[in-house]
Amino acid sequence: MCGIAGFCDFSNDYLKYADKWERVLKDMRSTIAHRGPDQDGEYLCHMVGLSQARLSIRDIQGGRQPMIRRKNDAEYAIVYNGEIYNMEELKPSLEKAGYRFETTTDTEVILYAYMEYGADFVTKLNGIFAIAIWDGKLNQLALYRDRVGVKPLFYTQCGNELVFGSEIKALFCHPNITPKADIDSFRSLFGIGPARIPGCGVFKGIYEIKPGCMCIFSAEGFKQFEYWKLIAKQHTDDYTQTVETVSYLVRDAVRRQMVSDVPVCSFLSGGVDSSIVTALASDYLQEKNCKLNTFSFDFVDNSKYFKSSSFQPEQDRPYVDRMLKAYDLNHTYLECDDSILISTLFEAVCAKDMPGMTDVDASLMYFCRLVKEHNKVALTGECADEIFGGYPWFYREEMLSADSFPWSMDLSARTVLLNDEFHSQLDIESFVRSHYEESIAQVPYLDGETAEEKQRRRVSYLNLNWFMQTLLERMDRTSMQCGLEARVPFADHRIVEYLYNVPWHMKYQNGVEKALLRDACGDLLPAELLHRKKSPYPKTYSPKYEQLLSERFLALLSNKDSRVAPFIDHRNAEQFLQSPKDYGKPWFGQLMAAPQMIAYILQIEYWMEKFDLYID
């Protein structure tokens, strides 16, 4: 994995002031050096500048970027973040076409594929990626983002110039770009967050290339094209065939993603998804007489304070222990305490460049930092719930039928701390409604589907394009902040495409959530784990953590220089702090309840101070 950044302007000549623009490239790269601490480099020509910070995973020495190749007197250059899992399948045809490979890295395969097949080459890739290619023959910059949005790529336009980067902070190193926020920034934070509107970077004028899209920037302007999208198709496989197909796809995705020139580990939560990935990864390494490193996450004294709810019915540790009896794993139990969690809460904002899933982000980032001491690449079970229908809003009638984002149905819980004036100014209800309606208008349906089938499609589509994006962003920023590459086998686009068209009665066979995945991988797991009810990523229930949050929040309210305090109804806030914290009624997803609302406000305050933001 890596961090990439750059700029392009067809009305400029960067080489006239090469020293200045090389410095800008280095500054942009240095802000995202955590994504690639192993190697770095820049490329500057008359109309474009590219920079990259590299995390060396394949061809440690030979895979340096920017990578430059020539063909017919034209120069091509690439910077790239990601992994291509079908590299070996693409190489023979390129070699037959006359290309000679100087490295064993996938970067060279990507560049040669572009040179041979043109801009549409991206449809041949299986992987996760954000790619920037300078085409010296056509004088154009091509930007690409993978199909499901695992890897980020932000951009902005400043006059005639396009500026891009893996993270927003890189853009702010450009001399003509400064952080700004407008009323829509705060509507997004309070109404949508910690999710983000597709293509929106929350900061004023900052955008993100959408998943499955490519952009061409030339003297004619900036054009964005959709090279991949979900398509509704008739599912003709019976249940047995469907189970066999899913079994193959999951196994093939994990095996492909084991490819690395450095050891691969896995996150093992004790849930079905991570246990399946761990089992397959372990079997793969056993064939090579190697043992898999695995890591589980929890909080100090969480067993003492744990509160069971319909969202989080039980703890994970017993199921991790059961996997350790079934597989020969080199396992490490990791824990986070309250003081670390509080301090990391604000580091998480720095990683994301905006407020996020508060302690859920912070704890994962802390755990990733510990994992990085042992491994540079980790497999995760992320995305299975969005794809196979594991969340309650897929099957609970009141959530399924809700005419809103099902993971965030009660908007009043988001505004309980805001004063009337600011609440009225935001008009969150209209803002959220417009984006919800815009999104469901894009849902692919089959002709003749029933109202219930259409509702299932809507929920699935919304999860893939909104909720899953939030979790992918969380996984990317928290892991890459620590120089750890986190891979997501369940997000293989072939799995996403196939499952989108599998009927709900197959996914929910016999009334069991994710029954299809359980049946497809039933031979891999102990019975008691295979049939375990879903339990999400752990969060802390410590009263000390709540106390620390409350103390910081009260200090914020009494600080005359606070930027967020003028938005808050102080009387309601004090009552909120004194009331019992309800963990069973989250305001986002399954993990963000009352304590996370306090933490979210604290993160917004930190964000505004860090970037010197006011409402523009």
Image: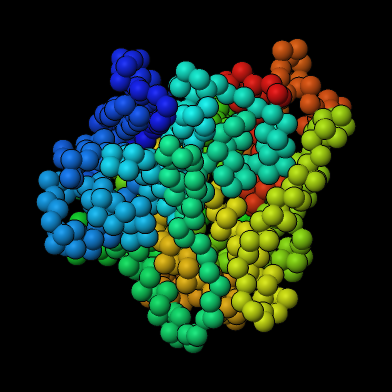
Q: Is residue 328 above or below residue 448?
A: above
Query: Residue 67 appears at what percent x and percent y?
Result: 23, 38
State which quadrant residue 218 falls in: top left
Residue sitting at x 23%, y 61%:
90
Residue sitting at x 12%, y 56%:
98
State which quadrant residue 324 falls in: bottom left
Tell which of 415 and 302 is nearer to you: 415
Number of numbered labels in the structure image: 0
Residue sitting at x 73%, y 31%:
183
Residue 71 in sight here: yes
Tell which of 474 and 296 is nearer to you: 474
Tell which of 43 and 363 is nearer to you: 43
Quarter of the C terminus within the rendering = top right
Q: Is residue 50 above or below residue 109?
A: above
Tell which of 179 and 116 is nearer to you: 116
Query: Residue 593 appears at what percent x and percent y?
Result: 69, 44
Relative side of 446 to 352, left or right: right
Q: What kind of colouring is applied to the model shown? A: rainbow
Residue sitting at x 60%, y 52%:
466
Query: Residue 238 appears at what percent x and percent y?
Result: 49, 87
Query: Residue 247 appears at what percent x and percent y?
Result: 39, 74
